[in-house]
Amino acid sequence: MKKHKVKVSLSDSQPFQAGKSNRRQFIKLGGASLAIGGMLLTACEDDDEMMPNPPANGEDEVFDLGSGDVGILNYAYALEQLEADFYTRVYNNFYAGITAEEQQVLTDLYYHEVIHREFFKTAISAAVSDSAQVLPELEFDYGDLDFSNRDAVLATAKALEDTGVAAYNGAGRLISSPDYLLIAGKIVSVEARHASAIRSLINPDSTNFAGDDVVDANGLDVAMSPADILTVAGQFITTEFTANNLPTS
């Protein structure tokens, strides 16, 4: 069976080649899901504009996340695939010297992110009429990231969780369905707990759990657009896809 090829490009930014952007930018982002299947189905029934674009036959096999709410769900599914893949690698081979607390936190995050990933896969599959409209399983490359190194693992986990929070915060205004918005609110609160836990592992007994790099003077968390998120997170995604039809306002 021919491998499904996916290419990332964004409607509101320059075309992006997955895996080619600055990996440091992702790490710096530290500065910068759920029993809902029925509700999702209900929310999807009357919205023709939310259907994703199936792979076309020429540019072929390049998957587009789609438009409307389902496009946003596919976008969230991509990010949850990344997080689940990262924590699976961590869980399957914990770094040497890991403490019991660190192992428990990373194990909990592993289970949460796998649940989030499977939730989105099931929910989107139930919401669309054609399985070709569901983002395929992505592949990832972490480059020279040393999974045996505590600092490298926790720094990447911190960046992933901060990115996840910013992604849900930024996507909220693009969601039409109140049901989807409720789901996003529930998930982003979990992602924020993850970010806080990782920050506490890195700097115990500090105020970094809600650092100035993620919480502003008004007590509000960072929000980032899908274009900005995909440009950064996509550096770990080797499967390419397009995001040309996501809502931007």
Image (cartoon, rainbow, N blue to C red):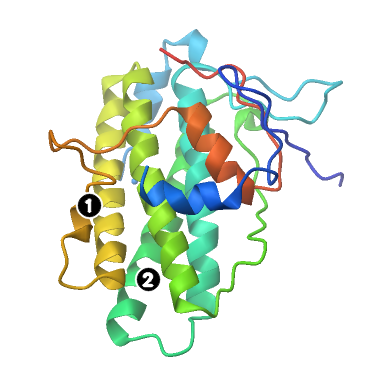
Q: Residues within 10 Å of mark 2 (few under 14, many from 20)?
A: many
- Residue 131: horizontal and vertical position, in percent? 64, 32
Residue 205 in percent (x, y) is at 15, 71
* Secondary structure category for the residue under label 1: loop
Pointer 2: what residue?
106
Residue under label 1 = 211
Q: Say above or below: 215 vs 218.
A: below
Q: Which is nearer the eye, 165 or 25?
A: 25
- Which is closer to the viewer, label 1 or label 2? 1
Task: Check contact, mark 1 vs mark 2: CB within 8 A.
Answer: no
Compare marks 1 and 2 and give the one earlier in the sequence: 2
Can residue 13 be seen by looking at this rendering? yes
Q: Amino acid at mark 1?
A: Gly
Q: CA distance from mark 1 to mark 2?
A: 21 Å
Q: Is residue 33 left or right of residue 7?
A: left
Is 221 drawn above or below residue 158 in the view shown?
above
Q: Indicate the quadrant where residue 36 lies.
A: top left
**Residue occupying image coordinates x 46% and y 37%:** 76
* Percent of width and height locating residue 191: 31, 50
